Image: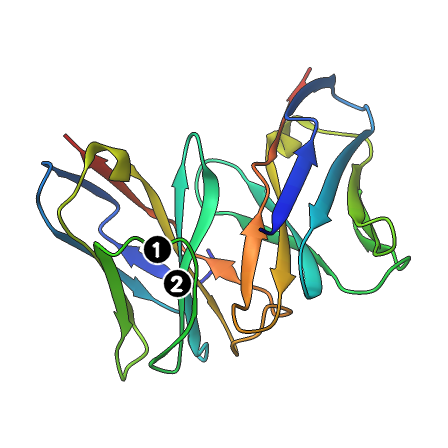
Amino acid sequence: DSGVTQTPKHLITATGQRVTLRCSPRSGDLSVYWYQQSLDQGLQFLIQYYNGEERAKGNILERFSAQQFPDLHSELNLSSLELGDSALYFCASSVGGYVQETQYFGPGTRLLVL
Amino acid sequence: EDKVVQSPLSLVVHEGDTVTLNCSYEVTNFRSLLWYKQEKKAPTFLFMLTSSGIEKKSGRLSSILDKKELFSILNITATQTGDSAVYLCAVGVTGTASKLTFGTGTRLQVTL
């Protein structure tokens, strides 16, 4: 158990809908990272927040957005969902905001878009 | 574009064998290379390497980085069925887009 929690575990929804994934980092960690893992693409970095501010952006679609709240939990919002958005979404956290730090991954949210 | 390539894609070995997994990279502003093990769910951290030639070791697992040739290897000796997993390599880069770029992984299956 990494100490990173994610809810929900599974989510099934229809195309065109909007969903929110939630992540709570390990106690004391200020950075939260979001990743998407699909069968054909591997693990793709989406976005990073550090202490409430966006720090780095990866391959995140415009239909997706994220934020980190004052209590450091983070939410990833996915809208106008398409079949291709079906994937495992991981959140990870680290103490600071630097890539030389270890990132600890949560158990993931499996999203299925029908 | 930053690239991380792992090989082989998949391998099956017998318990007790030694395996070597490879990770090569082409990135701008290299900062670190990390190895993760992914079984059913979340990747779990194994090693972080930032300096060339210094072996990191944890039990039967070890890893080394070559920053000149831009690759790393992960060795697992005396493999056990519990080592069956996908092993992910990730490279951290700094700059305006500090991030980890992951390879697609090597799927290892250890059979009795």
Q: In the orientation shown, which residue stands out farthest toward the front?
A: B1
Which residue is painted at 44% across and 30% down in the image? Answer: A40
| Image mark count | 2
Relative horizontal placement of residue A112, taking residue A97 as reference (left or right): left
Q: Secondary structure at mark 2?
A: strand
Q: Position of residue B75 (x, y in %)?
A: 80, 39
Q: Is residue A114 above or below residue A49?
A: above
Regarding mark 1 in the picture, which secondary structure is present there?
loop
The amino acid on which the numbered mark 1 sits, given as a three-letter code, is Ile
**What residue does disc 2 label?**
A47
Determine whether B80 is above or below B24 in the image: above
The image quarter containing residue A39 is top left
Q: Chain of mark 1?
A: A
Q: Residue at x 45, y 48 (%)?
A: A44
State the residue at coordinates (64%, 44%): B4
- Return the x and y of residue A29 as percentages of the image width and height: 46, 76
Q: Which residue is mark 1?
A: A60
The quarter of the picture where residue B74 lies is: top right
- Identify which amino acid the numbered label 2 is placed on: Ile
Q: Can residue A26 be seen from the camera position used here?
A: no
Image disc number at residue A101: none
Q: How many residues crowd around disc 1 within 10 Å: few (fewer than 14), some, or many (20 or more)?
A: some
